[in-house]
Amino acid sequence: MMHPEALDILTARLEEKRRAGLGRSLVTVGPATGARVRVQGKDCLLMAGNDYLGLCRHPALVEAAKNASHKLGAGCGASRLAAGTMDGHQELERKIAEFKHTEAALFFSTGYMTNLAAISGLAGPDDLVVSDSLNHASIIDACRLSRARIKVYPHNHPKEAARILAAEKTKGLKLLVTDGVFSMDGDLALLPDLWEAARKNGALMVVDDAHATGVWGAAGRGTLEFFRMIPQPGLIQVGTFSKALGGLGGFVAADQVVINSLIQGARPLLYTTAPPPAQTAVAEKALDLVDEEPWRREKLHNLSRRLRNGLIEKGFSVKSQSGPILPVMVGEASRAVAMAKSLLKNGLYAPAMRPPTVPAGESRIRVTVSAAHTEEDVDFAVKAFEEARQELFS
Ligand code: PMP
């Protein structure tokens, strides 16, 4: 049994967080239709998630999950390397490689585990990892897990990344890691310059396109396509099915030798049970939908533009210049929490992002657009922001 004093320590720590305006709680969102949800008994417009293409409730994905479960069962019963690999995993991996124009691909249970696997599966204590200061938490955790030497460069600063890559000597390999789209700021990594820095210094580069796959590039292939870059040896793409693709799971798309290395050594692949048939079937169908329903991407970018222009016109500070992630900057954590509360009262659910997710003094409301929204929804959101500002700060 835990010593009561230890529980007192935990209680005191929670209280301290709560007083600093940094307490977190799980908010249950009720049955959803399109972009509307029930939060605390109130019907709201949802601008809080990452369902960018509005695929979460797509009938074809729900059908794919149902059929796969009926035909193949609810679970795989073993890890991929034991007895858990099924046809569905390999079919999906072939399809991901085709989608991302790479030699090979590997599927994982979540995007979080994919980053853990990609970085810790390739880099070890003899190696160097050079990482953007605003990379996602899963990349930070992956760096720690790898036990490689870690150097962090200032956000989106290819020159500094190049300087570090050139200056740091290593016995082993060098790995440059960046988000393709930064989850809290919504900006795109300067990939052509970063890749140049990696290539010149003989480094591999990992691009986490969690927020870009399905969203960016003419055909939704992600940030490489947006920058008109073609996949090349040593350029490793990470992605997730949990955001624009409406399901769950992550992937690495890369050279065969990279994928083989992960199969040998990536602990988040080796020591967990294989993703179930419903999950791989949904993922496969979602890749089809990216091609079959391109109007979703176009609508998403049009709505994002409308919302950004609307908010800026009303004097709000939106940190990103394009795309469906709109960080509305507020400042102190307590102000952001008050703002989110007021928005909710006015019928808009958009969460406050506070430290440690974002730097101190840069708390914000992270508003996200989905193809499931309408122009009326976007205009409603701008009004909700105006009302909240009036209520709190006038
Ligand atoms: N990478 C980035 C940049 C993310 O924002 C996230 C999720 N917030 C992940 C990886 C993890 O993906 P998943 O939710 O599929 O675990």
Image: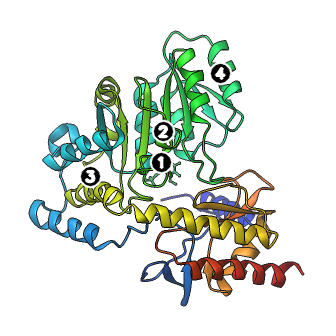
Asked if the residues shown at circle 1 and circle 2 are in contact, with their CB atoms under 8 angstroms apart, the answer is: yes
- Ranked by sequence position, the earlier of labels 4 and 1 is 4
- Ranked by sequence position, the earlier of labels 4 and 3 is 4
Could you say whether the residue bearing mark 4 is in a helix, strand or loop?
Answer: helix
Cα–Cα gap, marks 2 and 3 = 27 Å
For the point 57% across and 46% down, the residue is: 136
Using a 10 Å C-alpha cutoff, classify the residue at mark 3 as few (fewer than 14 neighbours), some (14 to 19) or many (20 or more). Answer: many
In front of the other: 270 or 210:
210
Look at mark 3 in the image and give the residue it sits on: 275
Q: Percent x, y for residue 380? A: 64, 83
Q: Is residue 88 above or below residue 11?
A: above
Look at mark 4 in the image and give the residue it sits on: 162
Q: Nearer the viewer, mark 2 or mark 4?
A: 2
Mark 3 near ligand 1 (CB under 8 Å)?
no
Cα–Cα gap, marks 3 and 1 = 28 Å
Q: Percent x, y for residue 269? A: 32, 39
Asked if the residues shown at circle 3 and circle 1 are in contact, with their CB atoms under 8 angstroms apart, the answer is: no
For the point 66% across and 58% down, the residue is: 9
Look at mark 2 in the image and give the residue it sits on: 224
Q: Percent x, y for residue 234? A: 43, 24
**Looking at the rendering, in which quadrant would you find the C terminus?**
bottom right
Using a 10 Å C-alpha cutoff, classify the residue at mark 2 as few (fewer than 14 neighbours), some (14 to 19) or many (20 or more). Answer: many
Residue 368 shows in the view: no
Look at mark 1 in the image and give the residue it sits on: 217
- Ranked by sequence position, the earlier of labels 2 and 3 is 2
Asked if the residues shown at circle 2 and circle 4 are in contact, with their CB atoms under 8 angstroms apart, the answer is: no
Could you say whether the residue bearing mark 3 is in a helix, strand or loop?
Answer: loop
Could you say whether the residue bearing mark 2 is in a helix, strand or loop?
Answer: helix
Could you say whether the residue bearing mark 1 is in a helix, strand or loop?
Answer: loop
Q: Amino acid at mark 4?
A: Ala
Residue 373 shows in the view: yes
